Amino acid sequence: MDQHQAPLLDALKALERRPIHGFGAPGHHQGQAVPKEAKALLGARLFAADVITPKGLDDRTEGAHVLQRAHEIAAEAWQADFCRFVTGGSTQSLHTALAAVAGPGDTVLFAANVHKAERAHALAAGLDAAIVPVLVDPHWDVEHGVTPTALADALDAHPQAKVFVVVSPTYYGVTSDIAALADLCHARGIPLICDAAWGGAFAFCEALPHDPLTKGADIAVYSIHKTMGALTQGSAILAKTGYVDLQRLWMAYELFQTTSPSVPILASLDAVRRDHALHGETLWQGVIDRALTLRRQLAAIDGLRVFGEGDLPADSQLDPTKVLIDVSGWAVSGYALDDWLVQHHRVSVGLSDARHLLAVLAPGTTARDVRALVKALRDAAQQIAAGTSGLPPLPSSLPRIDTLSVTMRHDPAAALFGPAESVPIEAAAGRIAAEMIAPAPPGVPRLVPGQLIEPAHVAWLIANRDAGAFFLDPIDPNQRRLRVVALPG
């Protein structure tokens, strides 16, 4: 198909030339009734484009197939057999993908570092989620991907599993050996879903890692907004024929997708697909060049380490545009340093934890942005050395990520919806979690309903909380108490 086409953009242009006298949603009617401040800030054309897909972007029966054609062109761009644009982020895409392959009571295999989206769907849909260990780098204290050996062991332990979900690339830009993992899954007759939220552009630039669909993944979920330039919440589900029932995937999509999707988000997905299909190599070579400059300059700052090719586990690749920086040599918290960078230099990184910062470069990242980050970290280095930064010290006994494990002791739904009580985190060891705790970013759950809270969890949560971690959506916003299953009697 002609990748120069952008059906959604073309339909919006036609609508702008010939507006409709609407008597339905949305109530602002292409910007006729919008608060002045919002229109001044966001622009009138944004509201003019905010229409619904039938009787707006298309006719009542979607007879022009505007959205359908956009999906078909995108499927070809990613070398897939199926595509759907999603306006609820990759959380919605992952819920859709899982609903297409597993039902209540089915066993699913999840990599230990999946996002809260996968665990939330398993909880809501009544899936039995078994956890596949991931590689943990002891020198960097970060999680990587799943090895074929770990997956083979999990498949042997759970022969009834319906699907395996892996995160590749990880939040740090490290891939798993998708080809080997897919072969193992296919030998058991089950599909592999790749949560490739951070890897949507891989298909469009040879200098980036391999796209998971080209290596045997059956479904790939991409957060097009995270790195490729679509509006926030813009995601895409891509799938291949063979191990996935594409009709069931389509039905699952219709179950989860709103009947009033945001047309500006959809149009941005269409536009980004076209730009990448036509100019992806050029777009991303510039990003890679800026990332290499950033890497060289950061590596020259005393006390910093930058994750590189030499740190990769076997049979993996690195997305060079994800720049992981170890700041533990400065003996300050990465969380606090993140806040300091914003406060003093208006520089915001993509992720921070107790020991690291992660800078994510994308087509919108400019050379000026790179210079600002380097300048800010050089200033931090000088002030930390002089003792004038005001940054709190990093706790000396900070537990490492490899101390955490997952032991389920209770039905997750019963734990979430049954009798519960609140206890101080310090007193939670030995209890059963009745809520999800997923420090964000990256939003990987460290506790889920039904999970045994072990002493290691208590130590890790307290240390990271005190270092500045943000626990996503806890029952106690002060991060002092945990919701646990009530004791009998």
Image (tube, rainbow, N blue to C red):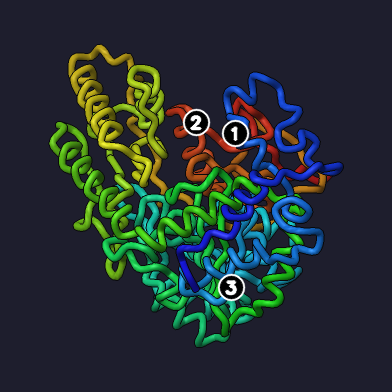
Separation of residues labelled 2 and 1 (CA atoms): 11 Å
Q: What element carries label 1?
A: helix
Towards the viewer: 435 or 90: 90
Q: Mark on residue 242?
A: none
In-image side of 424 versus 180 (left or right): right
Q: Do the residues labelled 2 and 1 touch (CB within 8 Å)?
A: yes
Relative to residue 58, is residue 329 depicted above or below? above
Towards the viewer: 117 or 9: 9
- Residue topped by disc 2: 465
Q: Quadrant of residue 64?
A: bottom right
Separation of residues labelled 3 and 1 (CA atoms): 46 Å
The amino acid beneath tag 3 is Phe
Towards the viewer: 418 or 163: 163
In-image side of 230 versus 36 (left or right): left
Name the N-terminal-most of marks 2 and 1. Answer: 1
The crowding category of the residue bearing disc 2, from other C-alpha atoms within 10 Å (few below 14, some 14 to 19, many at least 20), is: some
The amino acid beneath tag 2 is Arg
Residue 21 place in picture, x, y as percent: 81, 42
The amino acid beneath tag 1 is Ile
User: Residue at 35% of width from left, 24% of height from top?
Assistant: 341
Name the N-terminal-most of marks 3 and 1. Answer: 3
- Residue topped by disc 3: 82
Name the N-terminal-most of marks 2 and 3. Answer: 3
Q: Mark on residue 425?
A: 1
The crowding category of the residue bearing disc 3, from other C-alpha atoms within 10 Å (few below 14, some 14 to 19, many at least 20), is: many
Q: Quadrant of residue 359?
A: top left
Relative to residue 272, is residue 165 depicted above or below? below
Q: Is mark 3 on a helix, strand or loop?
A: strand
In-image side of 322 versus 187 (left or right): left
Residue 117 place in picture, x, y as percent: 61, 53
Residue 192 place in picture, x, y as percent: 53, 74
